[in-house]
Amino acid sequence: MTRKRPGRRARNAVLVPMDVDESPPLPRARHTNVTVRNQSKPSQSTSHHLVSAQPPLLPDAVVATSDPPPHSVENQDAEEHTHGEVYIEDMLEYMGHRQKRRRRGGVRRKKNRVALLNEWLPLRDQYVDELIRHDGRGDYHSTDKCSACGIAAGTSRCIDCLGSPPLCNGCLCAGHVNNPLHRVQRWNENFFEKYSLAEAGLCIQLGHDNLSCPNPRPTTTNLTVIDTSGVHRVVVRFCDCGSLDTAKTYVQCLRARWWPATVKRPRTVVTLRTCELFHALTLQGKMNAYDFWHGLSRVTDGSGLAAPKDQYKDFIRIMRCFRHVRMAKRGGRGHDPGGLAATEVGELVVECPACPQPGRNIPDGWDLVPADEQWKYAVMLAIDANFKLKLKNCGLADVSLSAGWAYFVENGPYKEHVAKYIDQEEMKCCDSSFAARDHANMPTHKRFAINGVGAVICARHCFYRKSGIVDLQRGERYCNMDYAVFSTIARTASGIKVIVLSYDIACQFSKNFLLRMQQYPEGLRINVDGVTLIFVVPKFHLLAHGQSCQVEFNLNYTEGVGRTCGEGIESGWADTNGSALSTREMSPEGRHEGLDDFFGAINWRKTLSLGKLLARSLKAAVAALAEQKAVLEDSNITIPLAIRERWEGMVLAWDADHSRPNAYDEPEAVTTLADVRLELALEESAEANTDVMSLHETSASVFLAVGLELEDLQYAIRMQAKDNESKTPVGKVTLQEKRNALQHRIRSWQVIQKIYMPAVAALLAASVSAEPSELTPPTVASAMPASSDATSAIPTASHLEPIAAGSTHAVTLTIPSATAPIKDEPLYLPSSIPEDMWSQGLSLGLIVKYRRLRVGQAEDTLYNIRRLLRLRTGLIHYKHVFVDGPGQNLNTRARNQIARLQARIKRYVVQYRMARAALLVIWPDGPWMARLQELLDEHVRAPRENKEGPGDGHRALAWIWRALPHEARDVPGHQDDMTEDEVHEGLRVDWVRTRMRR
């Protein structure tokens, strides 16, 4: 199809072919009179102000137009009407096409990187040609006149102006009065050579915002201007009017958006856009001033033959002043009558808007709320040290521009304090070790005056705190970290009732904390009257501590901290470590100012993203709360109310006083090898003492129970056949003897089967007639009823006729050939019988009894799985504590016992799955489905086994521990006289943790 498409002007409409499936481009808008015609009225003209973007060119057509032909005023209205009609048609077509694409869900996908590169690859020669074309005169090769005046020779051009037309020097200077930093070139009859506007005669008047000056200085000044486009030489004329606000030359430079390198008689300036660019690059990409300056030098002259004078030192001094002034401007200091000199300690920080600040973001009367609600206004602080942010011992003398105005503490009082503790030892961890501390005092540390920094941040939102960062002279000592903590609390958390301190060595740091505080000046002491101090260890670091620390300083067991992990300070170090290579070369004062700038930028980025973060966290918390509540309700069903109330009382008592018994602390139950061997020996003895049943005095329930036992023995022999021990001569004999015994029991059982299940005779006959290789044991899935209404397909006891032992319905069973492997011999339990044979082929009530036996079998196997999982946990703990070491013999014995336990667990898992599969066939809608769920491999785990990582907030107790009430048989080595408390004690820690997560 074709359509009309208006060109740059309405009269240049052309016909452009367009594919049917292609969305038409949006036509160009104009403010014009358009005629809208309809059939009811002849015509009506309406004025519209239409605004749209430039339409994209169609990919399958290129419209080439020449200059528009002249047109008269009298036919302009007709042309405008034509344009209006075309535009309305285009708009209707465009909108209709878009709506059609929306209806059919068509969305044009973006091409990936490979597709885009494949499109560009054939065109790279053309790209090279176009770049070479820029080195020549282009379309102006046939003329040497100035494109502006047309009189003088056009030998110069500006490569920063669009099109780069040839100009004479007069037109070049006249066009660049407002752009003195554009790069220009001059044609020397062979090629374009480097040129400058200063050489062309351009002189810039300063002092009046580009207006004429009534009293300019009689002499000009050559300035070196450092810009993003390179280093330029610019001729300027300063204003000499003597006005108070523009008399100073540095003021005139600043008015021109140039930062002078010196206050008196500046000769070097840096444009503000260059300062802003480098500032953004160094905050985001950790660009250092050395590389940035030399990059500008390469842009100015890539050959190195005419490189600009080295202005690196001037540049870093300017950038330091620029950072300082910009931070003060953003801190509102420009509006204070006292000026920057009146800036107080910590006034230039970007504060966390979500942390409680009395009088600013929390309601009045917050300090009067009950003690159990004070957590709403708690301050959570994370403490850590970073040994990457060092400072070389260069002995540079410098002056501080903003001592203590932001994140670092005041340097003078801090140095006086640290000087009193020269011989203080570094803090020792309890029973943990961290790699950072190992590298803190390496032999090369003497090269550094500062060995790192210690910081205090907001633990919830990861904002660096006011006066919360200190230098570390040697390691991580009390005198350093205490000063940072006391300083930031005194200035930001005064009056707060609950303060949570997260530190990877909080177990050590908390000792004598208040006693050490008394040695500090009055201004740094915390008023602890009515204040609750809580010390915790970050969740990831907690795993490196001992068991006592993991309980005492666990964030998961602390009331009111929510999902705070305490590890946010580590992510902040990852952001600041990139600046370490540049800041370690600075002076001490310059380093503080640079790092303050980095910390402020991090806080500002977090401020911008805080709203989305809190919204995302709230949504996740609501969903997790519903999930954990459901888990807790399921757990409450299986645990008596009195037991739960006692456990909850222990939690509340421990929260109030940590000297009370801790409900979260459970001594590990150590299971010895002898315990495990005795447990397994008793089970194996019970299995070996199972006698062959009496063939004449067997009830239906016993008959079915023996069938389930035979099913389990078949699986056991199949697993034993896969064992390496069964491949030895002795192993083969043992396995064959077990097969023979099992075959004898199956044949004896099948004699009874003909009495209760006469329908099996036909199935066994079919099995005998088949070749051994064709024997396929029937599965539960193959016996699943095909009907969608499974309830109506289940027969009841009233549908079955009794079959007496001597009835004529009895048939003679033909025993399958002995050559068939025992593992393939079908047992034809009721769940394997086709549904249409239930009513006549099974004795009365057999299905009902079979259902009950399968439910009991599934529940028994769950209890056995839970008991063995506890036994395995104890054995693994015993191995780690008492066995692990150089002794190979004990390790091998322990591993063998664990493997035996794991094999028995797997056997019970298979038994449960077989029982549940049978129930799905014979009782698909029974009440058992509410508690006997599908058992996956990830469900077979002990209560405290963690497969989700170190976090505990999203962990949930596996359903096998919540499905059935807890009994004595859950406990390894259980006794019949166990009390209710002893039976449930093993789940105390898991229940209180689930309660904590709800």
Image (cartoon, rainbow, N blue to C red):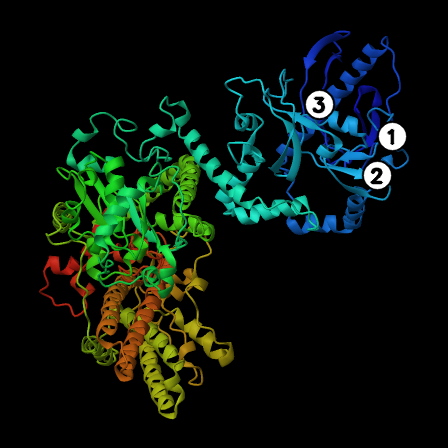
Q: Is residue 837 left or right of residue 255?
A: left
Q: Which is more toward the observer, 358 or 204?
A: 204
Callout 3 amino acid: Leu
Give the mark toward the camera: 3 or 1: 1
Give the mark toward the camera: 1 or 2: 1
Q: Quadrant of residue 92?
A: top right
Q: Which residue in the structure is indicated by mark 1?
A: 145
Q: CA–CA distance between discs 3 and 1? A: 49 Å
Q: Which residue in the structure is indicated by mark 2?
A: 137
Residue ID at (87%, 11%): 72
Q: Which residue in the structure is indicated by mark 3?
A: 92
Q: Residues within 10 Å of mark 3 (few under 14, many from 20)?
A: few
Q: Position of residue 3 (x, y in %)?
A: 80, 27
Q: Earlier in the sequence, mark 3 or mark 1?
A: 3
Q: Secondary structure at mark 3?
A: helix
Residue ID at (85%, 9%): 73
Instruction: Check contact, mark 1 vs mark 2: CB within 8 A.
Output: no
Q: Position of residue 935 (x, y in %)?
A: 35, 60
Callout 2 amino acid: Arg
Callout 1 amino acid: Lys
Camera sees residue 484: no
- Residue 713 in the image: above or below residue 835: below
Q: Earlier in the sequence, mark 2 or mark 3?
A: 3
Q: Secondary structure at mark 1?
A: loop
